[in-house]
Image (cartoon, rainbow, N blue to C red):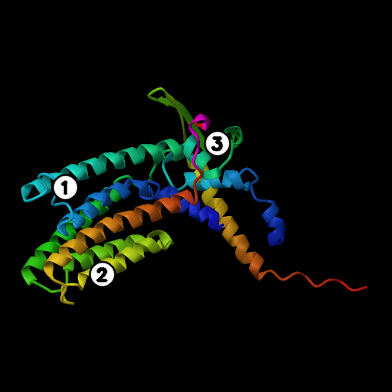
Amino acid sequence: MHRLLRLRYVTERYEQLQGLRLVPLGIPFLLSSAWREGLFTWVPGASGAGSRIWFAALFLFAISLSVSAKIYYQRRFGNVRTTAPIRAPVAASAFTAVLLAAISLQDLLQSPISIPSVMLAFGVGCLGVSGGVIRPHYLAVAATVEVFALSGALGVPFQIRDILWDRMIGVSFLVIGIGDHQLLRGTLVPVTHADTV
Amino acid sequence: MPTPFEAMSLLDRLLHEPARLAILTALSACRSCDFVYLQSLTALTKGNLSNHLQKLEQGGLVRIEKGFRGRIPRTVVTLTETGREAIDGYWTRLDALRLEASAFTPAPLLRK
């Protein structure tokens, strides 16, 4: 019974659980935090506007790796057409709108507590308990973001918070990606190409 | 009236088989999926999975479409309306049986 519920859960969220698609997206943020610490001063063009170009290029490369990861999942685990294909993009758009509103509110109120981080932690936490299955890696990330939201109130300097933010986002992508991939791998057995029909 | 345990044996055998139940449960959670996904889900061999799908198709519970994606052959499986009703009904019946079984008290044995 438990196994069947798990099959159902994984099938419903097959696209979302393709965690290796998220892992590359964390790398530009980790490199960005290292850059903010001054570890990449020797890299040509890594200062001023050049740093943004570097970040954009790295992010585009990460997206291309993410697409490759999607192809890997299609070949090894197959394809699923979900019942509500527009639900995820609609939810993501709505959450982005809420996040942008939180950023505006933060600018307006000048609160020492980071309102966008609180909203982000809430969103990640909700994902971690959706569908009646608890995904501890999401809750761990949500708790970390929540602590980060308080860093301003705790007196952490702005420059350090910038470094911490990038590092936290980078690590979060890795933790969520690997955690989701493990969940998927614990349920599905990869199929070798010769076996496919 | 049959006991819950007797009623259990009356469950539809087409559905009440672990691999086919897993296939139908997965299909009830999506619009459709391909053969590779069902194979990775059930860990069955290609031949075994084909047999189970054939039985389900013959029972009118799933629809199988064979095609190509580029040059790679691709088999897509969809739950039919009958199949959806059957799997929903199966779970309802199984839940009811579970409740009946937990409340079941056997009739006292006759003593000589």
Q: Quadrant of residue A97?
A: bottom left
Mark 1–mark 3 distance (CA, rounded to whole Å): 54 Å
Marks 1 and 3 in Cβ contact (< 8 Å): no
Chain of the residue under label 2: A
Chain of the residue under label 3: B
Percent position (x, y) of residue B106?
Answer: 75, 69
**Stretch of the chain drawn in magenta:** A190-195
Give the residue at x 7% y 66%. Answer: A107
A137 vs A131, nearest the viewer: A137
Label 1 vs label 3, nearer the camera: 1
Percent position (x, y) of residue A152?
Answer: 15, 73
Mark 3–mark 2 distance (CA, rounded to whole Å): 51 Å
Residue A55 - label: 1
Label 1 vs label 2, nearer the camera: 1
Tag 3 residue:
B60
Which badge, 1 or 2, is on the more N-terminal residue?
A: 1
Q: Amino acid at mark 2?
A: Glu
Quadrant of the snapshot with the N terminus of chain A = bottom right
**Direction top: furthest residue:** B71
Percent position (x, y) of residue A101?
Answer: 13, 61
Secondary element type, mark 2 = helix
Tell me: residue B49, above or below residue A43.
Answer: above
**Direction right: furthest residue:** B112
B62 vs A190, nearest the viewer: A190
Q: Quadrant of residue A99?
A: bottom left
**Can residue B78 be seen from the camera position used here?**
no
Q: Is B74 positioned to the left or the right of B48 in the image?
A: left
Tag 2 residue:
A146
A107 vs A41, nearest the viewer: A41
